[in-house]
Amino acid sequence: MKSWGDIMNDTIVSLATNLGVAAISIIRISGQDSIKIVNDLFQGKDLEKVKSHTLNYGHIVLDGEIIDEVLVSVMREPKTYTGEDTVEINCHGGIGVTNKILEILLTKGCRLASRGEFTKRRFLNGHIDLMQAEAILDLINSETEKERKIAIQGLNGNSSKMIKDLREILINLISNIEVNIDYPEYEDIYEVTKEDIRKNIDVIHEKIEKIIAESENGKLIKNGIKTAIIGRPNVGKSSLLNRLLGSEKAIVTDIPGTTRDIVEGNILIDGIKLNIIDTAGIRETKDIVEKIGVNKSRRLMEEADLVLLLLNNNEELTEADKELILKTKDKNTIIVINKNDLEEKIDVSSLNLENIVYINTLTYKGIEALKNKIISMFNLGKISQNEFNYITNERQLGKLKECLDLSLDVKNNLDTLPLDILEVDLKTIWNTLGTILGVTYDNELLDNLFSKFCVGK
């Protein structure tokens, strides 16, 4: 088995674009022999003598046969994506020609890159930290403008700076404590007091609390709002889904129990995804299939970030309605009263009037009011005005929460623990913050992270 150092010395190759019929395909090669390997196949300028970051016209030739007409980018380390010599071959976008060039490169000394290996090398060569690497994946997976903005903040290092600033406070404090412990005989050095530690740990605790609190906005942008439409059968849940989506996605009939499984769709409200689920009507039933759907509906109601509880305007509240109202009272719930064109028989006096919206699913009447209520409930307008410097990665947030608990322990034990023990606790926080940046890491973590990338990234 190769050592990690040997693997890093390999020259890797992969397709950087989708394999298929297109105008061009881009084949990316990175490693110490990348320029030489391609130059041996290239008919045109001597690639080993051209300037870095130049585009060179020519042909890929094997045993005198022209394989394809190409443009070759030559980029010399260290100012490349991976920090290594990198070559990109822009060839015609046919499947046959692309595969042929890849096959030749593999026979000439290249190794097929694993998932995310180009970005992994970029990290290991010190060009980005682990937070930036994870931001690249978020950028690739971003679906909305707000998701893109969060990812760019991470990629630019703005999120990393928040963590680095915390570590800077800690290392200054730890260094002074160590000097006090190691050189107690010197009278001209600053003596760190427990009050100094208290002030610094208070700052760190407050900053971490703020980052974690603000991450809720970031997670909202990244993951969207999981929204469940619930109610009794035949109150208009599927019609509401269709009106929100602007398309006839769910089947609508007058027969109660038509929706037996979940139907999903997505819309954007103020740049935030609403992941909407139309659930089966909740009622007692002996039908086995419908019962499975009802149980799913109950589970989704518990898991949802937002519940749209649909009621009928021209019917009095039933026991089933009252049960659903009771079960959703502690959740983000908007009570949507349908069929407002009919005689009002529903008594809303016992409901939260602030969270009631009247609609008519036969038309689009009330749909904008419902969207505005969602914007207000989740404060989406304020989120859209912020600078998007959020931490949304679960791994990073998990480590921050560990640091928050550790800082609280230091605060609580400050008066009882000696200075050297407090120093150990402060170092633990400092090291844990370091794992967020990838200052320390284990190979399993890296393998798991970069396996989520595509092969050519």
Image (cartoon, grey):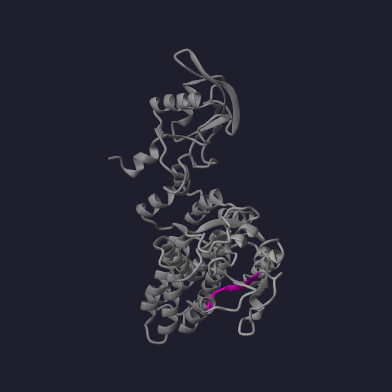
User: Magenta stretch containing residue 333, yes or no?
Assistant: yes
Picture residue at 40% right of the left edge, 28% below the top: 106
Q: Is residue 144 visible?
A: yes
Image coordinates for residue 221, horizontal then vertical, percent: 58, 61
Q: Closest to the observer: 145 or 268?
A: 268
Q: In the image, 203: left or right of 403?
A: right
Q: Nearer the viewer, residue 363 or 193?
A: 363
Q: 356 or 91, which is in the foreground?
A: 356
| Magenta segment boundaries in residue numbering | 328-338
Is 376 rendered above or below residue 353? Answer: above
Decide: is 408 above or below 308.
Answer: below
Is 41 above or below relative to 446? Answer: above
Q: Residue at x 44, y 64 (%)?
A: 296
**Residue 196 coordinates in the image, percent (x, y):** 50, 81
**x, y percent for residue 409:** 41, 79
Q: Residue furthest top?
A: 64
Q: Would you identify the image quadrant in which residue 23 lies?
A: top right
For the question of whether residue 399 can be seen, the reply is no
Q: Residue at x 51, y 38 (%)?
A: 77
Residue at the front extreme of this rendering: 255
Is 402 contained in the magenta span? Answer: no
